[in-house]
Amino acid sequence: SQQGEEDPQALSIQEGENATMNCSYKTSINNLQWYRQNSGRGLVHLILIRSNEREKHSGRLRVTLDTSKKSSSLLITASRAADTASYFCAPSRWGKLVFGAGTILRVKS
Amino acid sequence: DTGVSQDPRHKITKRGQNVTFRCDPISEHNRLYWYRQTLGQGPEFLTYFQNEAQLEKSRLLSDRFSAERPKGSFSTLEIQRTEQGDSAMYLCASSSLQVSGANVLTFGAGSRLTVL
């Protein structure tokens, strides 16, 4: 299906460490996006990677995309307590985004 | 422009009643999406519009759910004969489809529905 599936379901790290989250999907896509959701809040867009791109950076975020394996990863470097949130990948196909269950990241200070 | 607005923010209703949610997207955005989210889960796709045309409706959605976007501006999501299983956060998002095909969603804060 188009739905992204994130792994791990939950991740707990110390402040300053790196956090890596993975996403797998099953259909062809136009792009893949990552979003963050703080507890009780709406989702916020983090980064978009197009299907013809392999890697993209934005500040402390690094996203990779392997369309042959239908997978993506999100790396957050030098994590901060404020990065504590749920992270969702959303494969996009013809404008429709389907979200997975997300990865809950907890950064301990 | 203050972003995507949703109203009401909270709605408590009794089983069997009808409820309607409203979403006002970012004015220049031509696409509007509805999602439903329950605790611990990701947003579940319900439907989306390009201007006033409804492009797709989830097959998981029963006939009790209907959405409209008259004139391609605000949208309403109506749930008829609510059931306890409808209790969730209903999220609206809008986007402007780029020539490149990229479409970044801006989400509203959501409308939380509790069905007693």
Image: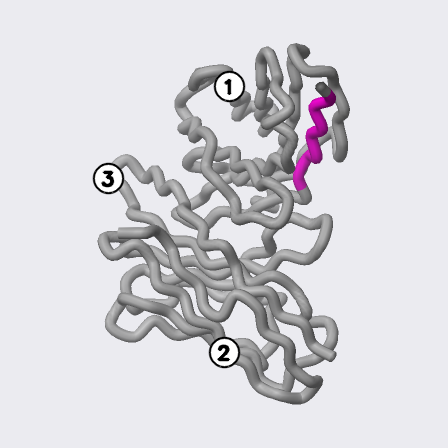
Check chain identity for marks 3 and 1: say if they share one.
no
**Category of crowding for the residue at label 3, using alpha-carbon neighbours closer than 10 angstroms: few (below 14), some (14–19), many (at least 20):** few
Q: Nearer the viewer, mark 3 or mark 1?
A: 1
Q: Is residue A31 above or below residue B79?
A: above
x and y, in percent, of residue A87 in the image: 61, 35
Chain ID for label 2?
B
Q: Name the mark on residue B20.
A: 2
- Badge 2 amino acid: Thr
Q: Name the mark on residue B99.
A: 3
Q: Residue at x 46, y 58 (%)?
A: B92
Q: Residue at x 43, y 34 (%)?
A: A31
Quarter placement of the C terminus of chain A: top right
CA gap between label 2 and label 3 equals 33 Å
Q: Secondary structure at mark 2?
A: strand
Compared across the picture, whether B70 is left or right of B35 comes to left
Compared across the picture, whether B72 is left or right of A90 comes to left
Chain ID for label 1?
A
Q: Residue at x 70, y 23 (%)?
A: A107
**Which residue bears the numbered disc 1?**
A61
Q: Which residues are magenta?
A: A102-108
Q: Name the mark on residue B51.
A: none
- Badge 1 amino acid: Leu
